[in-house]
Amino acid sequence: MTGRTITRADLSDAICHEVGLSRVDAAELVESVLDEVSDALTRGETVKISSFGSFSIREKAERWGRNPKTGEPARIDPRSVLVFRASHILKDRMNGIKTSGDDDLE
Amino acid sequence: MTKSELIQRLADRNPHLYVRDVERIVNTIFDEITDALTAGDRVELRGFGAFSARQREARVGRNPRTGESVTVNAKQMPFFKCGKELRERLNGK
């Protein structure tokens, strides 16, 4: 473990090297990718990236919780949450398992 | 939306790029995130979310069919936390 934090700038750099785009263009493309994924999710679509994982929206019902400070009951509004489900290929790679097979995303 | 649909959308928005380059760009992004997680690094994309590697301790599990004890090795799991901006967008704010 190196404990680094990768940011948009690192992704842009990688695109510069890989595809030979200018830094400005690469940064714009990174943003476009994130925008397209966000837009699809906002439309309620599931986004499936083969060999990486899928992002989907789960609808949570209203429920009653408590204000942890005062102990008073508090209504928690119904809301949408984003769930990321990693593909087996990603999980295996993180654990040093080489997979050659196809994807597991349905 | 699948990865190929994502690539097609980006290609439509960027007519000056070859589709194969758009494909390489998309693959590079997800490969970089995968490599970072494999190295135990964090990936923070402000407004979108953050990917990190979580450690799972070794444990004794059970084969659900036979009830036999099996040891489950320690492993790393990818974890994604949605960013504030995206979370608010998903809830129409």
Image (cartoon, coloured by chain):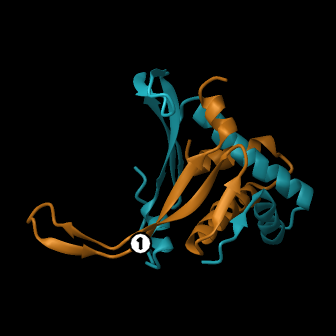
Chain colours: A cyan, B orange
What's the amino acid at mark 1? Lys
Tell me the quarter of the picture where residue B87 sits. top right
User: What residue sits 43% from the left and 74% below the top?
Assistant: A99
Neighbours of disc 1 within 10 Å: few (<14), some (14-19), many (20+): some
Q: Which residue is mark 1?
A: B75
The quadrant of the rendering that contains the C terminus of chain B is top right
Q: Could you tell whether B73 is left or right of A100 in the image?
A: left
Relative to A76, say whether B43 is above or below.
below
User: What residue sits 66% from the left and 30% below the top?
Assistant: B89
Image coords of residue A55 (percent x, y): 52, 45
Between B1 and A13, the residue placed more toward the observer is A13
Image coords of residue B79 (percent x, y): 52, 56
For label 1, the SS is strand
Image coords of residue A6 (percent x, y): 72, 64
User: What residue sits 88% from the left and 54% below the top?
Assistant: A25
User: What residue sits 58% from the left and 72% below the top?
Assistant: B40
Relative to A82, say whether A6 is above or below.
below
Q: Could you tell whether A71 is left or right of A18 in the image?
A: left
Residue A61 visible, this orientation: no
Between A27 and B23, the residue placed more toward the observer is A27
